[in-house]
Amino acid sequence: MKLVPDDASVTATYGILPHLSHREQIYDWPNPWKMAYFGNDDGYRLPDPSDIEYIILDRRNVGDAEQPLVDALIAPGGEFEVLFDQDDILVGRRVHGP
């Protein structure tokens, strides 16, 4: 958590969210890339994924369907640079736009 500035926009897996809930922009992974647990509408209020500055994921809580998205986001030349990847916890910082 110390790697992520307090004012950064973040998406995180649900077990990590309570530690980040003081933020103005915090989303439950895989939001905003894929609408999940975002209410009973059509997602029209879902933010632009390019607004997310950091991802914090517990890899044990990333579903098989979302793993290709994680891989693409952190791939060499991808949108996010890996700052930390240990004990199934991944922290990435945006370095490129979509």
Image: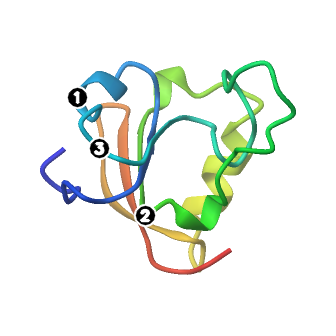
Residue 19's disc is 1
Between label 3 and label 2, give the one nearer the viewer: 3
Q: SS for tag 2?
A: loop
Q: Residue 68 placed where, x, y %?
A: 73, 46
Instruction: Identify which amino acid the numbered label 1 is placed on.
Output: His
Q: Residue 75 placed where, x, y %?
A: 59, 66
| Between 8 and 59, the one nearer to me in the picture | 8
- Residue in the image at 68% along x and 74% along y: 98
Q: SS for tag 3?
A: loop
Q: How many numbered markers are drawn?
A: 3
Q: Residue 72 placed where, x, y %?
A: 67, 60
Q: Quote the CA–CA distance across marks 1 and 2.
A: 17 Å
* Residue hosting label 3: 23
Q: Quote the CA–CA distance across marks 3 and 1.
A: 10 Å
Q: SS for tag 1?
A: helix
| Between 35 and 88, the one nearer to me in the picture | 35
* Residue hosting label 2: 53
